[in-house]
Image (tube, coloured by chain):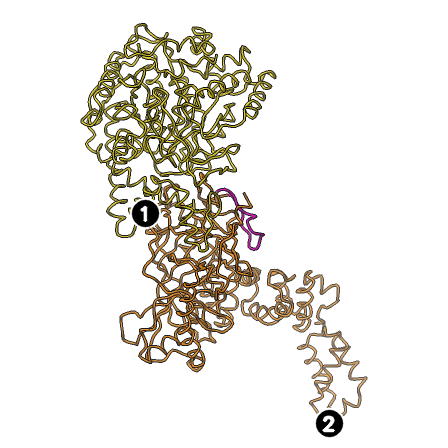
Amino acid sequence: MASSIFRSLQVHPFMLYPTTFLRRRNGVFHLTTKATQSQTDTQQRQPQTKVSSSNSTQSKKLDKIPKDYEAIIGIETHVQLSTLTKAFCGCPYSYGSSPNSSICPICMGLPGALPVLNSKIIDFAVKLGLALNCNLAFKSKFDRKQYFYPDLPKGYQISQFDVPIATAGFLDVDIPVEFGGGHKRFGITRVHMEEDAGKLLHAENGNYSQVDLNRAGVPLLEIVSEPDMRNGIEAAEYAAELQRLVRYLGVSNGNMQEGSLRCDVNVSIRPIGQSKFGTKVEIKNLNSFSSVSRAIDFEISRQVQLHSQGQEDQIVQETRLWEEGSQRTITMRKKEGLADYRYFPEPDLPAVILSQEYVDGIKNSLPELPEIKRRRYEQMGLSMQDVLFLANDKNIAEFFDATLAKGADSKLVANWIMSDIAAFMKNEKLTINEIKLTPEELSELIASIKGGTISGKIGKEILFELLAKGGTVKELIQKKDLVQIADPVEIEKMVDKVIVENPKQVEQYRGGKTKLQGFFAGQVMKLSKGKANPGLLNKILLEKLNSKS
Amino acid sequence: MLLSTLQTPRSLSRLTRHPHSFTSRASLTHQTQTLTPSSPSPPPQSEILSIRHALLSRRASAADLVLSQLARLRLAEPRLRSFLHLPDDDALLAHARRLDARIAAGEDPGPLAGVLVGVKDNICTADMPSTAGSRILEGYRAPFDATAVKRVRELGGIVVGKTNMDEFGMGSTTEASAFQVTANPWDESRVPGGSSGGSAAAVSARQCVVSLGSDTGGSVRQPASFCGVVGLKPTYGRVSRFGLMAYASSLDAIGCFGSSVADTGTLLHAIAGHDRFDATSSKQDVPDFQSHFVAVSSLESKPLKGLRVGLIRETIDDGVDAGVISAIRAAALHFEELGCSVNEVSLPSFSLGLPAYYILAVSESSSNLSRYDGIRYGNQVYADELDSLYGGSRAQGFGSEVKMRILMGTYALSAGYYDAYYKRAQQVRTIIRNSFKEALSQNDILISPAAPSAAYKIGEKKNDPLAMYAGDIMTVNVNLAGLPALVLPCGFVEGGPSGLPVGLQMIGAAFNEGELLRVGHIFEQTLENCKFVPPIVVDDIAY
């Protein structure tokens, strides 16, 4: 059985853009070998490429959209769900496992095999639907989307067509301060459930392709936004917020490099004041938020350039590919009319019926979502920069909240996390879950400083010990004998000793060189091995120095 | 549970009345079949019970039984061509010896022990090829047993081979098989019906005891009628479809053939019930059908007193053979003699069933057959380009009937036509479902012919698909409504060397197969002067 998977497909050796193989939609296949056809492809591409390259030099000057145009951007996001098993069979899925090692008759689409829905997918879809403030369909269904491609074993994809599980929601995003800040709300058109396809692996010599069905049948949620974004930053922030959301909800790892979160963006431009939309162009191959942002900005400049030169007819409905290397978009394929996927209801799966109790149960189990968390942090009086830093990473937010729960002051905790702890994580390339410091100990540390048990300076020393090796604050203070000396008698003794040992400096001080106070304080501190309470030390020192004058 | 019922005094008493019924088959079948037999004939026996009795009483070993059954099978096979694949005798004997070892050890070998079961070739079997009668799957071997096959094996049944069929179930004659044409055991110049023609012919000719078929629009019931055997299409969802190569998923049902109602019911009991691998399989309890059976000796004079039988008026109308109509009217009279009240009922939406069925079936099939693309399994043609690979593999792999239905289905689902065809047909389906519900609230069972005619000649309708489709009028409504229906032979019309059987269709409420089997069993036991054993068995003196 396994050997039949590796049947070769004939692929043209001179294909220009190998990644195009991986994209299958609208029934246009790029696995052609006919010389004539690929020549036309090339000819079609060339003028396009010229336009693109001539634009790319100019586009660098066009940092922002010229004032007389506005861009309309919508995003389709596919999120791979982190269920233990695939959507319709018991196969596990893990990224990067060897080809066709996680397949069965069901996800291979063998004759007679039937899909059975993994109910976890409904849980996840309802979670995300609620988190995106959508209306849920209490009765939805699955449909078959039909097209032929070697990575699609059944000849159809099980998806949702006219009754998606969630519709008409929105996502609130805080634009980072460095990009101008502000609060934006982006509409969500729909969320639906579907299965992923397999992958084609192409031989280096281009002579054949192989099919890997590990990914076939992995559950996806497709999230379609309203065309509400106006520039690359907004689009990237929308995608980043979606990533945060799925991570907060625990429905996906949201990893863009592994393809667990994939964004396709649609971009069109129109002169300000025009209500009709311009021709939209779809961009694929966006593997990071920054590529989302840069690809869109490039595409906007390209379209504005064409439009302002009176060549708007050259903006055609097509799919373009973001090239990371050359930082530009290139034509992947032109749309040849609307594809007909011949959707019809999937007869192998019963309708998906949600009860109010079920939905309420999920609603009550939702964690605090990023937007609500940010508003809460904001109300604590934290700066927006702090708020975004703490709330953007689910794990950091959890650490922060756990520390607060131990009674620590929010601003102090925020400062510790954002300064020394963040620096340590950055240097050591660790995540907050990997450091040895626990929220309990951070809280203890802050309390010890505040309560005067240790000085801030010693606090920092202890912090690095806790970050790297763990342990408790109390243990470390005891072991290293770091308790702050706050006994005036003891400090007085040390002050006396320093004064006695430095008669020359005392004389100079009393002669008016009061700057020497710092010298004395340093000496006392040294004598106390840094443990003397600085306030007390200075007070006693001044008394002593001044009293005998 | 099954075992205990088989050992009830009632069942045993029937066995004692015919202690040698299994081994004395030849003598039973020596009587000539005529339209008006002169002597009363004994009612059909449960071959499964006879085999079980022979095994448990140690009168015969499973190996002996398998050998003698195989001898009969092979004798008829060159003339009938019921099977597409038959495994080596050794493989079957190995199964039999394992059963014998269990019997020797005092274990119960299972209610289907030693029973040879034919399996339609679109039902997956791990130890034999499964081609669905199609060139595109020639030599294809599934890596798993269908749930129904798995359950048959678990209960001791021995899968004797894969039976011929119209390619992917698309046809009503078995002539659309890519490999061979099966003959009707009653008249070898006639078709056995279809698409489960091989399964029906095999049981009719006693090549196997029972068989599995599939019924999307009548593919079990019409061949049962043509071949004079009992055929049961269960309620949609009663039997798991896992391992059944899909034709039209919302209509497909695995069904059973037997030479008696009792055997058919025993097979259904074996395969019915929820399956976690089929999301459309029902969680309804499966009752013990055998306990519904009443032996003829214990029958009262009016055993079906009070049963309301509705004869569907539209099925005994124009376009139905006069001989068929009179056989069905005779069956209605027989019901009255058994104490039933028989009334004609009208289902005005009945004639809408055929067009609605064909639109839904071809639409779903166009999608279900997309997986046969030559990429992962099945026949692949060499091509320089992907589209040619698809086109070539499918052009060479599929037969013309299949291609025609894929084209029709693709058309019906296309943008702009969906509402006019598929959606409309779904609305008709709802109307039909409701009209059956209504009729079944007034009646306990509905009756009709299983087909408008008896078996016709091979080649007669091959070039007239519309005439062939029209023959499905009696059965398609039942699939659209998802209801169970039992077909059993009730009479003969003239034709062939010894007459041609006519099947009576009994339609029941959803998940009420038990009632159909109970009524069918009484009907069958009390139907005098009719024996439904084809001439080819009379010629056969295997044992």
Indicate the quadrant where residue A205 lies.
Answer: bottom right
Q: Give the extent of the magenta segment.
A: A90-105
**Which quadrant: the C terminus of chain A?**
bottom right
Chain coloured yellow: B
Q: Identify the residue position indicated by label 1 in the image.
A: B410
Q: Which secondary structure lies at badge 2? A: loop
Three-letter code, disc 1: Thr
Q: Identify the residue position indicated by label 2 in the image.
A: A511
Q: Are marks 1 and 2 on the same chain?
A: no
Chain coloured orange: A
Q: Is residue B429 magenta?
A: no
Disc 1 sits on a residue from what chain? B
Q: Is residue A492 above or below residue B295?
A: below
| Left or right position of A285 against B230 | right
Three-letter code, disc 2: Gly
Indicate the quadrant where residue A422 lies.
Answer: bottom right
